[in-house]
Image: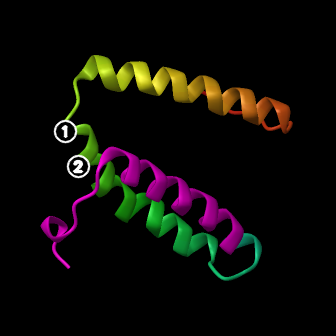
Amino acid sequence: MNNNDVELNAKELFLGLAMVLHSTAGNIENQKMSYEDARELYTKVLPDISRMILEEHSDDEMISAAKKMGALLNEIAKSKGVEITE
């Protein structure tokens, strides 16, 4: 399938990525996916999707969103006793 064959609006894209994140964790936990498979997904596949999204937004928009997401990640990690280093 060519990247141009699929069109997603922002909501579909966000929901799709959220489902990938959610299901990957569950699939690893249930041994349906290995850490190596997840690594391949996160290092070789999802960055291409990310680039498609990011190229449509300004640096200021990306920085603002990254700061908000970072704060959310840190808040949730802290509540679970996980330390995230910057």
Query: Where is residue 27, by image quadrant?
Result: bottom right
What span is in magenta?
1-27
Q: Extreme bottom residue here?
A: 32
* Pointer 1 residue: 55
Residue at 72% in and 81% down: 31
Which amino acid does the dot numbered 1 rest on? Glu
The answer, for residue 83, to whether it is visible in the render is: no
The answer, for residue 69, to whether it is visible in the render is: yes
Could you say where residue 66 lies in the image, as x and y percent from the top left?
45, 27
Which amino acid does the dot numbered 2 rest on? Met
* Pointer 2 residue: 52
Residue at 57% in and 27% down: 70
Image quadrant where one finds the C terminus: top right
Horizontal side of residue 47 vs 41, given as left or right: left
Residue at 66% in and 82% down: 32
Indicate the secondary structure of the residue bearing disc 1: loop
Magenta stretch containing residue 43, yes or no? no
Could you say where residue 18 lies in the image, as x and y percent from the top left?
53, 53
Image quadrant where one finds the N terminus: bottom left
Between the residue at mark 2 and the residue at mark 1, the CA separation in whole angstroms equals 6 Å
Location of residue 47 with respect to 26 vertically, above or below: above
Q: Give the camera-side residue of 42 and 5.
A: 5
Q: Disc 2, disc 1: CB below 8 Å?
A: yes
Magenta stretch containing residue 23, yes or no? yes
Horizontal side of residue 77 vs 41, given as left or right: right
Question: Looking at the magenta stretch, what is its main secondary structure?
Answer: helix
Could you say where residue 8 lies in the image, as x and y percent from the top left?
28, 56
Indicate the secondary structure of the residue bearing disc 2: helix
